[in-house]
Amino acid sequence: MTTILLYDSGMGGLTIYDAVRHHFPNARYLYCLDNAFFPYSEKSTSLLIERAEKIVGTLAEQFSIDMVVVACNTASTVVLPALRAKFAFPVVGTVPAIKPAAKLSQTKVIGLLATKGTVERDYVTDLIDKYAPNCVVEKIGSTALVEIAEQKQQTGKVDWERLTHEIKPWQKITALDTVILGCTHFPLLKAELQQCLPQVKFFVDPAEGIANRVASLLSDVDDEKGENLAFCTQRPNDFLDKQGVLKEWGFRRLIQLEV
Ligand code: DGL
């Protein structure tokens, strides 16, 4: 059985899982939402590293893991070296797709929509310097959008007023033709973002690129299919609702993990 572990602060990482499972429907998936520390947006780098090591370490004691996908930009911009130093299996990260966005943009005015933490990381500044030196890169760092996306995933409802407020600075930038969805929660709001930003031609979602990266590292996937399991790091009040949502994504059970 080939086991792939993905984790995020919440439901956003499911957008990455969705692309990976299309490549490897026969893998067994473990998905951990670190809801005890949701949202990650403004959490310190040391806390994010500690959470990564605990989540991956705890699950690696219980399951034979073949690969870890950090399905979160905020964590990936800081935790990858620590995880790679500690664990023998491959660790794939999710970072803002600056390079494809710079290539796609015709106006060379692109927007990075990510969490507050991600937009400020040196890692991201370096990516911009390296891959988008000829572009104007506008940035919005938002925790509210993460919460809006999580709520939509849970309830189907979108807080339009809050969403529009977050995006407002970009509504007047008519040359903005490409937006990088630099948080795995944001593809869950793509239709709403498109509606607020009609001038944008391309919304760049990293999921397919991550799935290709996984495919390049995982050539041989066992045909034996185990049950997909989801984990949370604290029992939420809406445990049964969350479990219901995760069932729809193909996870048999939601289990509380002590980390
Ligand atoms: N989905 C995550 C990301 O890609 C984290 C969102 C959050 O918890 O702030 O950045």
Image (cartoon, rainbow, N blue to C red):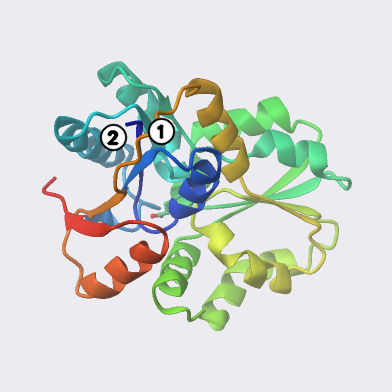
Q: Residue at x 46, y 47 (%)?
A: 17
Q: Is mark 2 within 8 Å of ligand 1?
A: no
Q: Is residue 33 visible?
A: no
Q: Which mark is residue 49?
A: 2
- x and y, in percent, of residue 9 in the image: 34, 52
Above or below for 256 versus 22: below
- Using the rendered view, name the quadrant where residue 188 is placed: bottom right
Query: Gap between marks 2 and 1, in whole Å?
Result: 33 Å
- The residue nearer to you, when weighing 230 against 175, is 230
- x and y, in percent, of residue 153 in the image: 44, 70
- x and y, in percent, of residue 22 in the image: 55, 45
Mark before the other along the chain sequence, 2 or 1:
2
Q: Are marks 2 and 1 in contact (CB under 8 Å)?
A: no
> Judging from the image, what secondary structure is the residue with disc 2 in?
helix
The residue identified by callout 1 is: 223
- Using the rendered view, name the quadrant where residue 54 is placed: top left
- The residue nearer to you, when weighing 250 against 186, is 250
Nearer the observer, disc 2 or disc 1? Answer: 1
Amino acid type of the residue that numbered disc 2 sits on in the rendered structure: Ile
Q: Residue at x 41, y 36 (%)?
A: 69
Question: Is 36 on the left-hand or right-hand side of 224?
Answer: left
- Farthest right residue in view: 106
Classify the position of the N terminus by image quarter. Answer: top left
Above or below for 140 versus 149: above
Above or below for 121 versus 235: above
Amino acid type of the residue that numbered disc 1 sits on in the rendered structure: Asp
- x and y, in percent, of residue 152 in the image: 46, 73
Question: Is 146 on the left-hand or right-hand side of 103?
Answer: left
Q: Is residue 227 visible?
A: yes
Above or below for 5 versus 213: below
Classify the position of the C terminus by image quarter. Answer: top left
